Structure formats: structure tokens, C-alpha cells
Amino acid sequence: MTTIHRTLGPALAGLAALAALTTTPPARADLPLPVKEMSAAEINALSGLPYLSPSNQTFRMAAAVQVSAYDKGAPLQGVQRSSGAAAAVYRSLPVQASPPPLLPPMPAGSALFDHAQTGDHAQSWATMAADGKPYLHARGFGEFGAEATASWTTSLVVPAGGSREVVLRFVLPPASVAGYTEQDGIGRWRSRLRGEVLVNGFPAWSTEALRLTIEPKVQSDNLSETIVLQQFGQAMSFPTNDEDAGSGNDSSAATVNSQSTQRVVHLSLGRFDPGAAVDLSMILRASALTVPAAPNGSDHRCKYNNAAARYYCSRSSVTLNGAGAEPPRIYLVP
């Protein structure tokens, strides 16, 4: 009995220590994270300093799109990559023999399908301009999915002469995450935009806006639905806010198409020693789709009305318009 007790003693002590580790939360570091958004005073200190941008630094641009639509053929995708030049892609279902011009600035009304005659369809434009300004437009009606992605990447080496603080300045253009529920062709729609900054492949900053409908339905011939805007990471500035305590600025059919306010972001990425290689990337992703009320359902498809000789469809769309934005800047601060 004594021997067994001595044998199990250390094992029990180890188990107790392990249990303590699993029940006690790990200590947080006292130091702030190296990546942070800069204060007004810190931003003012950058005034007049030289910086790198697509005009004097090699940036690699990329764009990608993907579309799918009910009864319009197999899903399509397209990708383009460029170095020091724009990357621009467009795809649609149904396929167009003579596709409309690619962005920028944004597709003209004549480039958009007429859902009343086309029914279920999807269109996606994605452009990262040579100056680093992004343009996204993903949209569709009925049963569809549309994705659009634009990104830039650049690499630099910290020069000799002491460590440098690397600062990235970029402009997040006005964005919309929108949709519309047609009571004669009800569909639950989802619109999502996400932006990310990567440093040496690791996430450093992100923002995301998702607007969606919750249980759309018809009551006494009047559409009754709940539209919700959810945000994650560093929030964009939309006129609507469904997550605060008040209800006066909630999303509605009248405000769902409202754009966010353009935002200028200054990120301090920390200090790097001379000779250190730094890879920076900005990725912007848009996705729009509709979903059925139940898995594998078809109630979100466009509905054809024989008497009116047209389709009725719900829709969703995401846009990001970089026309008024500015190229990204990289400061190496002594």
C-alpha cells in the first residue's frame, strides 16, 4: 500500500498542476501589441516625411471573381495578377458575348442585367488599379452567388542607419452592403464586405460588415422583415447601426442602400531592424448571395409571372468605390 502511494503521488501532483493550468486563464502581456492605429498627434508627425507608394515602389495587384446562378450554366471564376499595373476581372451568368468595360470607376447602368427579363443571374467586377485603389461590385438576383476580391502586395527591406518604425496609411473607400426583398419573389439575402491588412503573412488589421435579412415574409400583402447590419473588427462608418441601444438608426428598406463614409487609416506596424524584410498586403473581399428558408430549398429563386410577362426576384449587392480614394503610403520613420 505504501509503495502504491509513493508511485501515484507524483502522478497525482502532475494531474493537479495540469488541472490548475486548464482552469486558470493565461496571463496577458503588459506591453501593447506592436500594430496599432495612430493618434492624431502621431499622424501629424508624419507630415512632410517621404513615403513609398505604387508610384515609386513595386506593388503587385490581383483581382478575382466567382459567380453562380440557377439554371444559367456552370459556376465561373476568373483571376488576374499584375506587377505595377492594374488587375481587373469580370464574370457573369448568363455569360455575355461582349462583356461591359471593367472598372473603374463603377459599372454603368447599361452594363447591369434586367432581372425582370433575365431572372436568376449574377455579376461580379473586381479591380485593383495600378495606383492601389480598389473597386468591387458583386450583385445578383434570385438564386445566385457572387464574389469579388481585389488586393495589393509589396515587399521592402528596412535600410541601414538604425531601426525604423513602419507606418502604413491607406484609404478605405465608401462601401455598401445592400439588398432588396421582393414580396412576389421572396429570398433571404446576405451582403458582406471584409478588408484585411497582413504583415509578413500575419493578420494585423481587419474590418467586416455583414447585412442580412432575418425571416422575410408577407403579412396582409405587406412585406414584413428584419434587416440587420453586423460589424466585426474595426467598424466602418455607416449611417445605420443595429448594434447600439437605440432604434432610430436601425437598418430599413429605406436605408439599406446607404454607403459608409470613406475612412483614412494610419497603422503603426512596429519597429524593424536594418535589413529586415517586410511583406505588406491589403485584401478586400465582397460576397453577395441569397439563401433558401430551409437547406436544399428553392424558394429564393426568381418567380415568373405569366400575366405580367416578367420575373420577380429578391437581390443583394456589395460595392466598394475607390474613385475618390488615395494610393497606399508606407513611411519608414527613424
Image (cartoon, rainbow, N blue to C red):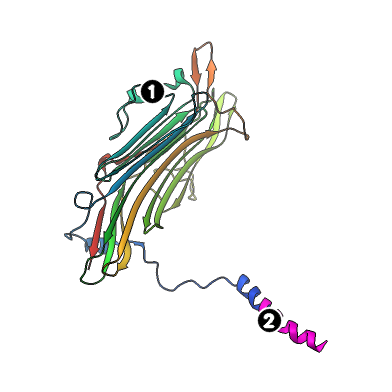
On residue 264, the disc is none
- In the picture, residue 107 is in which quadrant? top left
**Residue 169 or residue 177, whichever sits in front:** 169
Q: Main secondary structure of the magenta part?
A: helix
Q: Is residue 38 visible?
A: no
Mark 1 vs mark 2, CA separation in Å: 71 Å
Residue at screen point 33% across, 57% down: 279
Image coordinates for residue 280, horizontal then vertical, percent? 33, 55
Whether 100 is among the magenta residues is no
Horizontal relation, residue 195 to residue 290: left or right:
left
Image coordinates for residue 126, horizontal then vertical, percent? 35, 37
The residue that label 2 is drawn on is 13
Question: Which residue in the rendered view is the most extreme toward the top?
Answer: 307
Amino acid type at image mark 1: Gln
Query: Which secondary structure lies at badge 2?
Result: helix
Query: Which secondary structure lies at badge 1?
Result: loop
Asked if 271 appears above or below 127 in the picture, the reply is below
Asked if 168 appears above or below 8 in the picture, the reply is above
